Amino acid sequence: MPALFSRSAGRLFRILIVVGIALAVGIPVLLMAWVRTPPATGQHSAPAQPVEFSHQLHAGAFRIDCRYCHTTVERAATAGMPATETCVPCHQPVWYNGPFFAPVRQSLATGKPIPWQRVNDLPDYVFFNHAIHIRKGVACETCHGRVDQMARVEQAAPLTMGWCLDCHRNPAPHLRPRSAVTTMGWTRPADSSESGAALARRYAVKPVTDCSACHR
């Protein structure tokens, strides 16, 4: 009885099976790798803003504390964005009346807030509370990077679940005294008795990895 398929057809079927298995395994692996890359996570993205506000100038050269503009960071889940009126007092009329401040003047005239573009944007299913992190000694630059060196703010961290869990599993190395949480470029003194472990005990910081901590 003659063979149902020729030898060449049999080889082709075997090749197709191998290719199918490789695709079934390889595509999910590649996708899992891709979602951790900066283009997928948004890391290093720096969206254009309606006003070219320079953190490098304000937080860097002028050393304005983060809390001057982000007033609710110590007591609320969100850090808060400053009211348009916050931008006015420090600037001389020559600046305020120039084209650079046109969006600010329009906001004041219409009563509508300046449409700032969010830089660090977590998914809706993720709950993040700024206040609890600040109270536990987690600094602004831990997540936001050296904003005092950014003319245009960019997303400094990947903000992936794995990145967050790395800190939650071992928070001590990321802690500093509460008095230094807004300090940019802070380094832990080599001979300081306030090590990360000591701060963790002082602020009652414990590893938190249960799902309900961030997904509520």
Image (cartoon, rainbow, N blue to C red):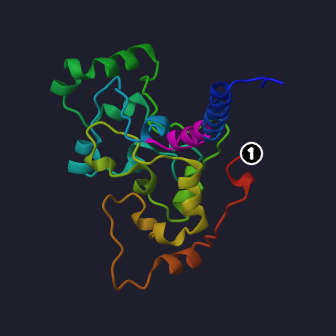
Residue name at image x 43 percent, y 61 percent: 181
The x, y position of residue 188, in whole percent, is 36, 74
Does the magenta portion include 23?
A: no
Residue closer to the observer: 106 or 146: 146
- The quadrant of the rendering that contains the C terminus is top right
Give the residue pinned by disc 1. 216
Residue name at image x 41 percent, y 49 percent: 144
- The quadrant of the rendering that contains the N terminus is top right
Query: 155 left or right of 1?
Result: left
Dominant secondary structure of the residues highlighted in magenta in the image: helix
| Chain part drawn in magenta | 26-37
Q: Amino acid at mark 1?
A: Arg
The x, y position of residue 157, in whole percent, is 44, 48
Q: Is residue 162 above or below residue 137?
A: above
Q: Is residue 62 visible?
A: no
Q: Is residue 177 visible?
A: yes
The x, y position of residue 187, in whole percent, is 33, 70
User: Residue 105 lies in what quarter of the image?
Assistant: top left
